[in-house]
Image: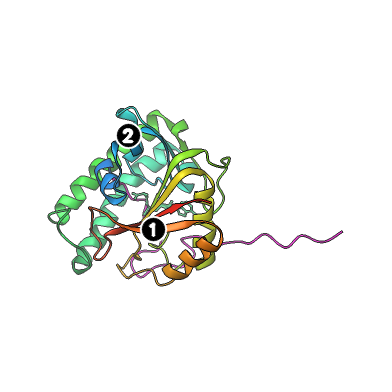
Amino acid sequence: MASQPPARSYPRVSDKPGPDRSDPLISARPLAEYRAMFELSDADLAGHILDCPGGGASFAAEVRELGGTVTSVDPAYGRGADDLGPHVVDEVDRGNQYVRDNLGIYDWSWFTDPECHRRMRLGGARRFAADYAAHPDRYLSGALPALAFEDRRFDLVLSSHLLFTYGDRLDLDFHLAAARELARVSAGEVRLYPLVTIDSRPYGPLDELRRRLAAAGIASEERKVPYVFQLGADRCLALSGP
Ligand SMILES: C[S@@+](CC[C@H](N)C(=O)[O-])C[C@H]1O[C@@H](n2cnc3c(N)ncnc32)[C@H](O)[C@@H]1O
């Protein structure tokens, strides 16, 4: 009997410390940022959306309050509410300190200043923590590049601040496998944002990734979005197919 090749193991995002922080941030973006980063229309918000990684974002809680349906997936959702809720609130100051230490790599048109950034993210973190405690069943523990969903389960799939952001420690094979997995579970589009790394540099192998996706039958299109915070991060990548 032919022996099976060993399963590919991918580096975790925390395997290689970045220049700024030893662990990836569990950030807490509200609906307003998601709407702009992914240029979401009301029609987009009416479908069943997968948010992966959901992190500490209040996007899902806010969309549900509007009557929508969001499934959030993140490895951090293995943690209990007493642990993850306060941690996400604490993470706001860690992220805000990085912003204050690196003011020059940001565009200050969305947030007027670092205090505005802190206030808006704190609002998101608190809203997430309350929803996570009240409805833990809405948050599923899982990790790219393997999701426990059937093909085409969602109408729209969103993924922000994991792919490309941690391009210094997650390799091209991981990006390809993760993007293909997100496309597999979407009946519509996958939208990825931003297309720059954590220090606001363009993700180098983006063209190669798009070539490999095209070879796998997945079309990709860069779209300008009405949001920029990291300098140069004014585009999302929309995937469709196979
Ligand atoms: C910077 S946060 C982004 C959260 C959210 N999308 C936002 O924009 O606020 C990055 C998240 O990626 C999660 N993460 C790390 N490795 C992952 C993986 N292999 N698959 C899915 N999520 C992962 C972390 O737990 C963390 O919550």
Using the image as rendered, state which of residue 224 and residue 31 is in the foreground: 224
Q: Which residue is mark 2?
A: 63
Above/below status of 92 relative to 199 = above
Q: Amino acid at mark 2?
A: Val
Q: Residue at x 46, y 46 (%)?
A: 74
Q: Position of residue 242 (x, y in %)?
A: 54, 51
Q: Is residue 62 left or right of residue 69?
A: left
Question: Is label 2 in a helix, a strand or a loop?
Answer: helix
- When asked about the image quadrant of residue 167, the answer is bottom left
Question: Is label 1 in a helix, a strand or a loop?
Answer: strand
- Farthest residue, direction right: 1
Q: Residue at x 34, y 42 (%)?
A: 86
Magenta-colored span? 1-29
User: For the residues carrying marks 1 and 2, which lies nearer the camera in this image?
Assistant: 1
| Residue 221 badge | 1
- When asked about the image quadrant of residue 227, the answer is bottom left
Q: How is the image coloured?
A: rainbow
